[in-house]
Image (cartoon, grey):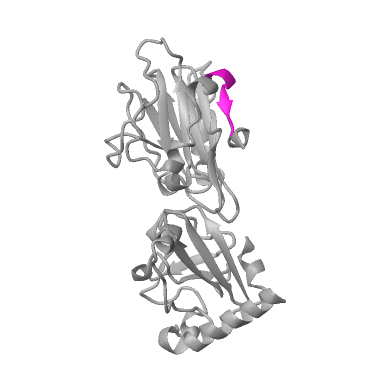
Amino acid sequence: MFHRMIIAALGATLFMAAPASAHDEEALRNAPPAAPYAKVSDLVALPDFLPGLGMLYVDPATLPAGPFLGYDRDGKLAATIYMTPIEALESGTSFDDLGVGSHNVSAVDIYYNAGHPGVDKPHAHVVLLHGEDARARLAE
Amino acid sequence: MITRRQFGRVAGGALAALASRRPVGAAAPRDIEMRGTARGERVWFAPLAIAVAPGAMLRFVNHDKGNSHTATTYHPAIFDRPRRIPSGAAPWDSDFLLPGASFEVTLSVPGVYDYYCIPHEHAGMVGRIVVGRPGDPGWEGPAGDAGDLPEAALKAFPRVAEILAKGRIMPEDLA
């Protein structure tokens, strides 16, 4: 119950923050999103589809935090992901007013990641899932 | 030193062809797997450390479906890192291996070879290969200087005596 309240509060916060930093939801609904977004696997050595995150696109100017847009295998937006280096957070860096791929946020996952090409220091993944079926669509 | 790189399933046929051209009686490569959890919380080489005879072939294979990895020796010629391989050995870098891809290297100079994964060194994804034994001609033991290595990497290297005693050390052996 508490978790649901947090998710609802976070969703509401994101929605309220939208006018300052929102994306054009319609333009991002299907892959590929227009420039300045670029396919992550074209920028660094990563598979086209990452289980759990999908096909990732990012505006390189927003690295490392993103937002990264995660699309399912049908090219439908399923998640917005942020990657925040632990070291940066510990040193007081904040990541504010980040864009959102969709205002429909059904759940949020936050977990540790040891690193990967593009964000090669330990960091947190903050994953906003867009739709009840988003997790399943990104699974494999 | 001989190196060779393969690109995932597409190169499977080529790999088989190359393998078939190995000299008769040549030993099969010893695999070192690159692995990680589904969400990337942990990443590792398995085995973490291995002891082999001079002339052994090692094959690094990426079994991590959600990440790419490298096997890169510590050497000034590669990203200006401190040398942690025998002075008579040539450094190597697999470059990024996508899931299913592999890289082979043959090691002939006796001594201790330390290597790391470029995007995961700070997470402690390093490995150690011991070629031959102390006393072999040209043997060079482990580097004594920490250099610029992150603490997570330094504390991950098993001791040479333990590697020689066990033959190989898996990450879970240290848990």
Furthest-right residue in this view = A1
- Dividing the picture into quadrants, the one containing residue B117 is top left
Residue B18 lies in the magenta stretch: no
Q: Nearer the viewer, residue B63 or B115?
A: B115
- Residue A106 in view: no
Whether residue B137 is situated above or below residue A11 in the rendered picture: above
Q: Is B165 colored magenta in this rendering?
A: yes
The quadrant holding residue A138 is: bottom right
| Quarter of image, res A87 | bottom left
* Viewer-closest of B21 and B165: B165
Which of these two is toward me, B11 or A43? A43
Query: Residue A49, image x and y in percent?
Result: 53, 60
Q: In which quarter of the image is the N terminus of chain B?
A: top left
The location of residue B68, given as percent across then percent down, is 48, 49
The residue at the point 54 percent across, 31 percent down is: B31
Residue in the picture at 34% in, 14% down: B138
The percent position of residue A108, horizontal first and vertical second, equals: 60, 72
Q: Give the range drawn in magenta.
A: B164-170
Quarter holding the C terminus of chain B? top right
Q: Name the spot of residue B47 as percent of width and height, x first.
A: 56, 33
**Which residue is pictured at 44% across the width and 78% down the height?**
A99
